[in-house]
Image (cartoon, rainbow, N blue to C red):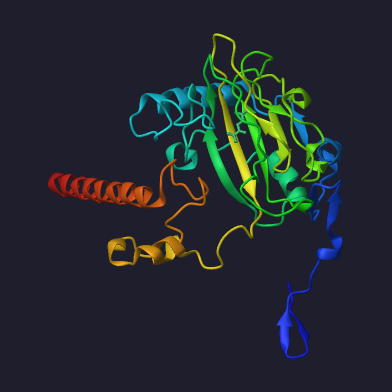
Amino acid sequence: MAYQKQSDTYIRPSNIHKRVQLGKGTTFLPGKKDPSISHLIDHVLEHGYVILPSLFTKEQVDTGNSELARLHSEKTSGPASRGGRNTFEGLQTRRVYALADKSRALDCFPIHETLLKMNDYFLQEHYLLTSYHSVDIGPGERSQEMHTDDGLVHLPRPRPLMGIGTMIALDPFTLTNGATTLIPGSHLWSDSQTPTREAMIPAIMPAGSVVYFLNTIWHSGGANTSSLPRRSLTVQYCQPWIRPTENMTVAMGWEDLDAVPKRLLELLGFSTHDFMGYVDGRSPRAGVEMRKRRLVEWGMKNEEDERKKGAKL
Ligand SMILES: O=C(O)CCC(=O)C(=O)O
């Protein structure tokens, strides 16, 4: 985008006047609207969410489930892969974080064309993935606490849309197995309206479907009173400006982080805001140490492969 000269300083032209306000809850800058999905967009504008039935094929769902079974059987799948550590994660719920790092078989899910087209309208160009993990709600799980996914952002409503949430059903979502519950229209609410369980409806949908929602909507994982798990993926996207200007955690060499003052490390992003900023469900420092170990192992394996190749020549 071109810069405009204004007196002695250069500023970017503002398109803030194009901002749309939804009720008293959400504002956003509409982006590209693909005509093939305008009915879906209209549903989201009115209700805050839309169900996209059978977006993924049976083969994709089967691959998703077998990949999750593989990850659950591995010791390296992260701290919540055998059960949540608190009631928000869900004590009977298994979550595998950092899926983009752990599997190439699941790549079709976060980049489905329809999801990206929806995002192109609701989020600004160059939006990011902010959360991508599995949520396998086991039998006996209680309802998760009601929340909005922008709950850690202390800006008054109406507030800018920070992101989009999706729940991808790898099992049918039913009345009894923990289907995501949402309060339709709560993206329009002001801060003075309080969510209640009674106002929630379950997102009942066949396996392969997706519930797509603005992250100003009140929702929660449901209680699982059935005898089977409710397997799913959650893919969440955020505005491109939700990050520091300089990508400090990548810019920093990780070789000797202990030499950096603790307070400076925190400022560089080796810290969390509540759980925001986690690495594979742990602190960024623990995540860095894990990656360093993996790099060393990878380097040693490469060296060994080269040595074997050399011995054969
Ligand atoms: O599992 C679900 O249906 C919703 C989960 C959720 O909203 C969350 O963990 O933030």
* Identity of the residue furthest to the top in this view: 227
Q: Residue 112, how many percent across, how many down?
A: 65, 38
Name the image quarter holding residue 282: top left
- Above or below, 130 against 88 in this view is below
In the rendered image, the residue lying farthest to the left is: 311
Q: Quadrant of residue 31?
A: bottom right
59 horizontally vs 99: left or right: right
Relative placement, left or right, of 21 versus 224 is right
The residue that appears at 49% across and 21% down in the rendered structure is 92
Horizontal side, residue 251 vs residue 300: left or right: right
Residue 221 position, x and y percent, is: 62, 27
Nearest the eye: 144 or 251: 144
x and y, in percent, of residue 32 in the image: 80, 52
Counting the numbered discs, the total is 0
Residue 181: x and y in percent read 70, 26
Quarter, ligand 1: top right
Let me know if residue 181 appears in the view.
Answer: yes
Above or below — where is 271 with respect to 263?
above
Image point 50% across, 64% down: which residue? 247
Task: Name the quarter where the N terminus is drawn.
Answer: bottom right
- Front one among 304 and 61: 61
Can residue 109 be seen here? The reply is: no
Residue at (78, 86) in percent of width and height? 6
